[in-house]
Amino acid sequence: MRGFTLVEVLVSATILGILAAGIYGVLDAGNKMYYNDMGLLELQQSVRQGMEAMINELREAGNIQITTLDNDTDQILFNSYKGIGVQYYRDINDLNSDGIVNQIIREYPLGSRRVLANNVTRLKFLHTSHYLTIEIRTEKTIRQRPLSFSLKENVALRNE
């Protein structure tokens, strides 16, 4: 009779199982890495866009007032070529009523809010003679794995 013995079938099944487990491991690792990298990329893009928008306007700022709201949050109020009373702050109380907290908000005129960045856990400003230091940190959890990204920029003030 032609056919396979039970031992041959078991050896073949074992080899196939080992190969399948190896392929699954590689694909699973790639999938985790992809979602991790995409989450980090999203954090970086959000922070960089928010930072760029703030820097462009803060370069021309005058009459700068910084208020500390908590250890990780400052609010900055200033005058710029776009208007008087422009402010940036971290929305920790959902002031713009969109159901999302931890956003960088640009408010001007009073009551008119625009979101610049999401997932922000730290927004700090430090004003020295002709420079303003901006520090932003974002955090997000992707598939039970915490991700964070920080960015710190020094802005040369032209109107100080």
Image (cartoon, grey):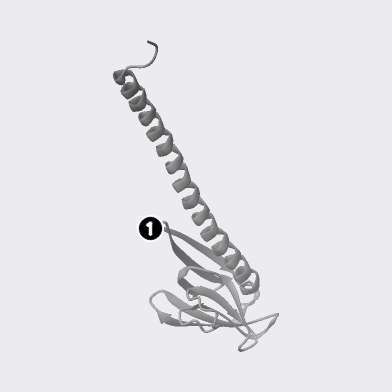
Q: Amino acid at mark 1?
A: Gln
Give x and y (percent) for residue 146.
39, 58
Q: Which residue is mark 1?
A: 144
Quadrant of res 106: bottom right
Q: Residue at image x 57%, y 66%?
A: 51
- Choose between 134 and 47: the one closer to the eye: 47
Q: Residue at image x 56%, y 72%?
A: 130
The extreme left residue here reads 7
137 to 21, vertically: above or below:
below
154 to 89, vertically: above or below:
above
In which quadrant is the N terminus drawn?
Answer: top left
Q: Secondary structure at mark 1?
A: loop
In which quadrant is the C terminus drawn?
Answer: bottom right
- Choose between 129 and 151: the one closer to the eye: 151
35 to 25, vertically: above or below:
below
Q: Residue at image x 61%, y 65%?
A: 52
Q: Tell me: 43 left or right of 17.
A: right
